[in-house]
Image (cartoon, rainbow, N blue to C red):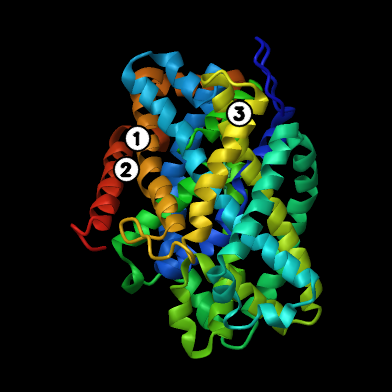
Amino acid sequence: MSKNNSAQRATFSGRLGYVLTTAGSAVGLGNIWRFPYLAAKYGGGVFLLVYLILVLTFGYTLIISETSIGRMTRKSPIGAFRHFGSGASFKFGGWINAVIPIIIGPYYCVIGGWVIRYLAGYAAGGVQALAGDNFFSDFIANGASVEFWFLVFAICTVVVIFFGVQKGVEKVSKVMMPALVVLAVIVAIYSVTRPGALAGVKYFLIPDMKHFSWMTVVSALGQMFYSLSCAMGILITYGSYMEKDVSIEKSTSEVELFDTGIAILAGLMIIPAVFAFSGDKAAENLQAGPSLMFITMPKIFGSMGFGTVIGIVFFLLVFFAALTSAVSLAETSASTFEDELHMSRKQATALVTVIYIGLGTLSSLGFNVLSGVTILGMDFLDFFDFLSNSVMMPIAAIAICILVLRSVTIDGITAEVTLGGAPFKRKKIYAFILKYLSIFFLAVILGSSVLNVFGVIHM
Ligand code: PFF
């Protein structure tokens, strides 16, 4: 894919090109790192159930809307909103979508840095050291080390967008992604067959209402946005590169399926292992949050034959999945700066770099040097994650729904989806959710997560 501002906008080559590239952006740390820790923390099977329902309803509605708006207007989010009107509300709708990747990108690189740290650890032969109980907490307490590895990952990302070599990265990741699936299947089988793991399989797959809380819904919704890369303008941009003869419904369904499949696989790797390897600390470890993957996977590798090799391969594959996603986040921000602030690629990359280093450093140091500083009770990384996923994305999603209902119209979306006789099988459910549920539901989620943080309600 390449961006082309001339009248003839560059397009993906065919449906496969679209699906692979979009899946490359969608599959990343969200699936492997974020989904398992949220599922572990917020209810296991009941989280999974709520997540699946949300993907098939609200997720589907948003993906179809954003992709169609992109293909219809051939613009990125700010331009696409402007296409339908020039008032302040259109400006706001475009900008909120465009700002979200700028908030997510820097802390995404911090987690990317953790991945490289572990990769380096396995390469140095430290399979048993990495499996130690305190390895992660010692690492995270060392500000210089976390910052260093964050910078390594951030530099990889910025270098790719500066030289415009996304295509090269995409090519590599097209090989890496199937490899990741194969390895994840092997590790998941190993993990679920460990003694004691069955309790984890049950916890993850069988919904139990006693683990349900409103936070289950709030976190599942945020995760759905994050994982599918929706409610942040990305899919508008990707839709704008999609050829007119590609079926929107078919290809977006495939991306949805692939993305969700990998998340479930990651859950099967990690959650049963929490039960098998934590002994009497299982309940505590389920609550571990962002560190879960980094404390659980090394235990698995530490107990396996060829643990060093598998550790290296696993973290290398996760690194590539993370890099393609980080590149797509940074690239969107760079092109927003180019288009809206009339910057050159050099200036836009410089601005991305400055923002990434500033916000990423706050996230890196929030666990150590700046651990005394909290915002609304959260460390910086958690705060950026909360701000983007639980506040800004619901607002961005509402903006998209209003844009469709008021300006694009459901008929307009239908015309775009069914262009050339392409199917729109789930049109009824699409229209129903959009008209009657989406704005109300999103507003309730937004309101409750904000009130919860301010201590007005407790979820
Ligand atoms: N969907 C990605 C993930 O699950 O890791 C995160 C992401 C990547 C969001 C790229 C947005 C984006 F443009």
Instruction: Please identify the quadrant where the N terminus is shown.
Output: top right
Callout 1 touching callout 2 (CB < 8 Å): yes
Residue drawn 48% across the image and 65% down it:
367
Residue drawn 75% across the image and 41% down it:
170
Q: Is residue 54 left or right of residue 275?
A: left
Q: Which is more foreground, mark 1 or mark 3? A: 3
- Which residue, given by chain and number where applicable, does mark 1 sit on? 398
Front-most of residues 394 and 337: 337
Ligand 1 is found in which quarter of the picture?
top right
Measure the C-alpha gap from mark 2 to mark 3.
33 Å
- The amino acid on which the numbered mark 1 sits, given as a three-letter code, is Ile
Up-down relation of residue 102 to residue 85 (above or below): below
Measure the C-alpha gap from mark 1 to mark 3.
29 Å
Residue 348 circle label: 3
What kind of element bears circle 2? helix
Q: Is residue 387 left or right of residue 232?
A: left
- Asked if residue 342 shows in the view, the reply is yes
